[in-house]
């Protein structure tokens, strides 16, 4: 057996990235790449390529459909999916439920403070808007903890909704479809890299 054939464990700085590069190198028989799976230049290039592919596909779907499949908090979600693939926050359950909580909390805040029809204006933040963003954020972060589904990018999603940047029900449904698409892309890429990415719940790690 090749001396570097065993998949590396989690790196203290680069997370699960070395394991992903190692898995791809093994799959395609790239011995030199396999030996350099801890190089920051190799890891940076890997993240560059995978993030470009995942966000690029979502962007194309958004452009073709003229729908908000692409939104800012997908960026940090993509980073979590590749940097911390086996971590709690990257599990499909947490990614989906976290963003869903953010969407629901954000829309509830718009309803409570009568902002469902108000256009966003980031240069003129009113008292109702301040109350709405406070409510949606505290609901999102606390519910993620109470329900044990932490996913930090969801805090950005709920602020987007609470600020009215995405506020109609059809837009919010499309947003969640975008989340599902990103989860699917993360699963495909991680599995291609031979990383045991979970199908739903986080991977249980020994305590």
Image: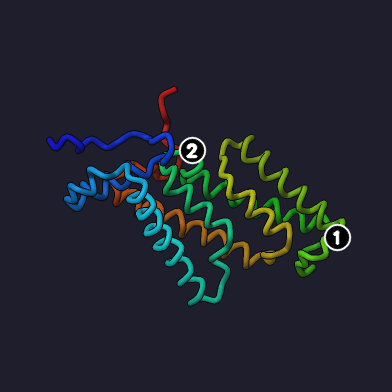
- Residue 127 quadrant: bottom right
Secondary structure category for the residue under label 1? loop
Q: Which mark is residue 88?
A: 2
Question: Does 43 appear above or below 64?
Answer: above
Mark 2: few/some/many CA within 10 Å (<14, 14-19, 20+): many
Left or right relative to 8: residue 31: left
> Residue 27: where, in percent of width, then height?
21, 49
For the image, the number of numbered tags is 2
- Residue 112 quadrant: bottom right
Mark 1: few/some/many CA within 10 Å (<14, 14-19, 20+): few
Q: Quadrant of the N terminus?
A: top left
Residue drawn at point x = 32 percent, y = 49 percent: 191
Q: Nearer the viewer, residue 65 or 90?
A: 90
> Residue 67: where, in percent of width, then height?
56, 72
> Residue 109: where, in percent of width, then height?
76, 54
Q: Earlier in the sequence, mark 1 or mark 2?
A: 2
> Residue 168: where, in percent of width, then height?
68, 66
Left or right relative to 195: residue 204: right
Q: Quadrant of the C terminus?
A: top left
Q: Nearer the viewer, mark 1 or mark 2?
A: 1
Secondary structure category for the residue under label 2? helix
Q: Nearer the viewer, residue 115 or 124?
A: 124
Q: Which mark is residue 156?
A: none
Q: Which mark is residue 126?
A: 1
Task: Tell whether label 2 touches label 1 (CB within 8 Å).
Answer: no
Which residue is at the far left?
A: 1
Residue drawn at point x = 42 percent, y = 49 percent: 82
Residue drawn at point x = 57 percent, y = 36 percent: 148
């Amino acid at each position: 057996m090749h001396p570097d054939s065993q998949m590396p464990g989690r790196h203290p700085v680069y997370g699960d990235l070395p394991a992903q590069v190692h898995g791809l190198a093994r799959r395609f028989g790239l011995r030199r790449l396999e030996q350099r799976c801890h190089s920051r230049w190799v890891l940076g290039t890997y993240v560059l390529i995978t993030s470009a592919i995942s966000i690029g596909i979502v962007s194309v779907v958004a452009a073709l459909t003229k729908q908000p499949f692409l939104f800012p908090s997908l960026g940090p979600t993509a980073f979590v999916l590749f940097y911390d693939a086996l971590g709690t926050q990257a599990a499909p359950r947490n990614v989906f439920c976290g963003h869903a909580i953010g969407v629901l909390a954000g829309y509830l805040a718009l309803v409570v403070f009568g902002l469902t029809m108000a256009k966003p204006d980031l240069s003129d933040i009113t008292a109702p808007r301040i109350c709405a963003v406070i409510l949606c954020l505290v609901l999102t972060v606390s519910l993620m903890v109470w329900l044990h589904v932490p996913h930090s990018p969801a805090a950005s999603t709920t602020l987007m909704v609470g600020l009215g940047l995405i506020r109609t029900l059809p837009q919010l449904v499309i947003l969640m479809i975008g989340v599902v698409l990103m989860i699917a892309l993360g699963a495909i890429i991680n599995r291609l890299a031979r990383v045991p990415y979970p199908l739903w719940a986080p991977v249980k790690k020994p305590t």
